[in-house]
Image (cartoon, rainbow, N blue to C red):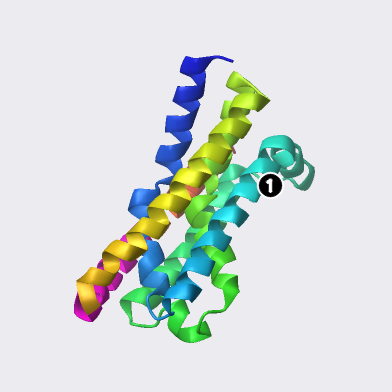
Amino acid sequence: MDTYGFLQALLMLFIILDPIGNAPIFHSLTMNMDKNQRIIIIKKSVVIATLMLLVIGFVGEAFFRFFGITLNDFRIAGGVILFIYGVQGILGKTEAEEISGDSSLAIIPLATPLLAGPGAIATVIYIKYRWGTAIMLGSILIDSILTLAILLLGEKLFKYLGKDGSLLLVKLFSMLLAAIAVNMIGQGIIGYLESH
């Protein structure tokens, strides 16, 4: 195995998954759940994102080609979803308040597009074609374990902020989430226009 290539792939995917940056967003979307619910949601979202990336690594490109879906389509759709969640958080209406622990939150937007988003999809496909299936598998599994550990640790750190501190973070990171969404939509539109 190409050790240097493996480390490159590992770091590349870790940066795209961005568990450190996503930890506050995960917290803001689950802050009204009890501790056990939050842990379940976090674990489920990481497992789902991991499975998605594994499937994409093996059949993703062929699947997208079959249905005529591009990464730009995925960017725009994912951006719209994130923008809705961001606006809800800014206005004080989070998904956690609305569904009271519904496990669907683990799928959208946590597993995708926050973790297994357009960037992660493109990165997994790139890793497979540059370094091979073994390195792709290893980087997905190891980065998923690291992501889970960081997100769970983040939950422990945020409890010390208290209600007011957590509420402030919700507003700040909801704004960030909306900004990320606008950027994602913009990239998708630009990419779409450039390809036509």
Residue 9 x/y as whole percent: 49, 27
120 left or right, relative to 66:
left
Residue 84 x/y as whole percent: 45, 71
Q: Residue 176 magenta-drawn?
A: yes
Asked which quadrant contains residue 103, the reply is bottom right
Asked which quadrant contains residue 64, the reply is top right
Towards the viewer: 9 or 142 = 142
Q: Residue 73 magenta-drawn?
A: no
Image height check: is 40 above or below 145? below
Task: Find numbered disc 1 in the image and state the secondary structure of the residue it sits on.
Answer: loop
Which residue range is magenta in the image?
163-179
Image height check: is 6 above or below 96? above
74 left or right, relative to 29:
right
Q: Residue at x 40, y 46 (%)?
A: 18
Q: In the current view of this chain or complex, which residue is farthest to the right?
A: 66
Tell me the chief SS of the magenta region.
Answer: helix
Q: For the C terminus, which image quadrant?
A: top right
Residue 69 x/y as whole percent: 68, 47
Q: Which residue is mark 1?
A: 69
Q: Residue at x 76, y 48 (%)?
A: 67
Residue 66 x/y as whole percent: 79, 43
Q: For the N terminus, which image quadrant?
A: top right
Towards the viewer: 55 or 137 = 137
Towards the viewer: 193 or 185 = 185
Image height check: is 14 above or below 94? above
Q: Amino acid at mark 1?
A: Ile
Asked which quadrant contains residue 94, the reply is bottom left
Answer whether residue 193 is visible to the viewer in this image: no
Q: Residue at x 66, y 42 (%)?
A: 54
